[in-house]
Structures are given as C-alpha cells and as structure tokens.
Amino acid sequence: MPFATWITFVIAASIIAVSPGSGAVLSMSHGLSYGVKKASATILGLQLGLLVVLGIAGAGVGSLLLASEVAFNIVKTVGALYLIYLGLSQWRAKVAVTGDLHADAVAPSMRRRVLTGFLTNVTNPKGIIFMVAVLPQFISPTSPLLPQLLILAVTMCTIDQIVMHSYAFLASSMQRFFRDARAVKKQNRFFGGLLMAVGAALFFVKRGGQTAS
C-alpha cells in the first residue's frame, strides 16, 4: 500500500474515530463510572466489534446489506434496541456507598464489559455504512485484498483505541466531582439518556447514510 494512500486513510480514520457516537458515549460513561483501567475492557470489546464491521465491509457483505431493505432494517432495529437497553441499564445502575461515605458505580464483570463494547459496535449500522463508503477508496483492485485489509484494520483499531481511551481518560479525570450517591446516579442517568437517544436516532438511519427528515 502506497504511503500516501495509508496516511490519507489515517486522517479519515481519525475523523471517524473522533466523531461522537455510541462508542464514544460508552467509553466516557465507563471511564467516569469505573475508571480508565476497567474501561479498557469495554474499549477492547469496541475494537473486536470494529474488526467484525471492517471484515463485513471488506468482504463486500456490507454492500449487500445496504442493498437489502429487510436486512438493513433488521440490523438497524437490533442495534437501536440494544443501545436503548444499554442506556436503560445505565440509567438504573446500582450505586455502592463505601465506608467513607463515597459512592462508586458497581462495575460489571470484565467479560460483560468486553461483550457490551463488542455488541455496541457490531450492531451499529452506521459503522457499516461508514466502512462501506470509506474502505473501497483505499483498496487497490490490482493488489491482494487480504494484506490491504489487515493494514487498514490495524490502523483503524489503533487509532480508535487511542481515541476511546482518551475519551475514557478525560471522563475519569472528573471522577472527583462525582463521589456521592446522588452525583453518581445523575451521571448514570445522563449517560444512560445519551445512549438511549443514540439508539432512538438509529431508527431514523436510512440506507446510504441518509437520515429520515
């Protein structure tokens, strides 16, 4: 892959990663609730989901998905409902009060955090739309496909991991302002509401990246 093509993809991938979305909201939510170390498991799940989306788009299945109204609507509905469920769970999350009267959000298991991140990305039809639109611009039809996909996947996941950890770190740096039970509950409801809003917005996503008016 020519260096000029790769560096252009780096710029495009950085813009996509920084753009606010369900992954960013989830990273900030878990960073603020559980700290960066525990949020890393969530971010790992996001990257695994991103790899699946990249594979789907690279294999051409994404184009097939976008061409089928029924298939696209199924994926869209599953993704939207999952984010709404995730937001509702965050809204209702339990708060533990420690002996010094400080409050902490109760962290799910590592496996559950990884699974949450994975499902958040893999059920996001907007991610597939982005990848189907972006990837073909950087793949040469005269060169072997697999090495190009591997380079793009490693690049995209590296950038996304750095950005998501940055979101989690920025959120975790505000933990000292959310140490009593009432503040933690407000934080849970804020991020839960955001996730539900993102999920509801997915219902209006149309094929080709257009949104319903």
Image (cartoon, rainbow, N blue to C red):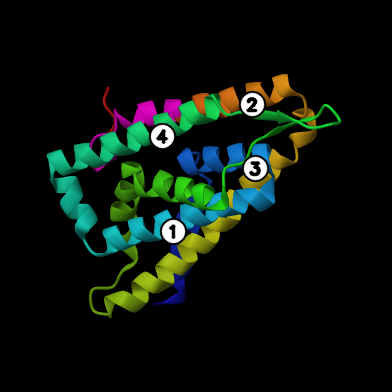
Q: Considering the numbered disc 3 on the image, is that residue within a helix, a strand or a loop?
A: helix
Q: Is residue 84 visible?
A: yes
The reply to whether discs 4 and 1 touch (Cβ–Cβ < 8 Å) is no
Q: Residues within 10 Å of mark 1 (few under 14, many from 20)?
A: some
Dot 1: element: helix
Q: Position of residue 123 (x, y in %)?
A: 34, 44
Q: Distance between the residues labelled 3 and 2?
A: 12 Å
Magenta region: 196-209
Inspect the image, locate mark 1, and give the three-letter code of the amino acid beneath it. Leu
Instruction: Name the residue that disc number 2 marks.
Output: 187
**Disc assigned to residue 48:** 1
Residue 48: quadrant of the picture: bottom left
Number of other residues with Cα within 10 Å of mark 3, as a class: few under 14, some 14 to 19, many 20 or more: many
Count of residue discs: 4
Residue where numbered disc 4 is placed: 83
Residue to which mark 3 is pinned: 31
User: Horizontally, is 180 left or right of 56 in the view?
Assistant: right
Circle nearer the N terminus (2, 1): 1
Mark 3 or mark 2: whose residue is earlier in sequence: 3
Inspect the image, locate mark 3, and give the three-letter code of the amino acid beneath it.
Answer: Gly
Residue in the picture at 59% in, 37% down: 29
Q: What amino acid type should be assigned to the residue bearing mark 2? A: Gln
Q: Tag 4: residue type?
A: Leu
Q: Which residue sits at x=71%, y=19%?
A: 182
In depth, the one of 99 and 75 nearer the eye is: 99
What residue is at 75 percent from the left and 35 percent from the top? 175
Marks 4 and 1, how far apart at CA: 17 Å
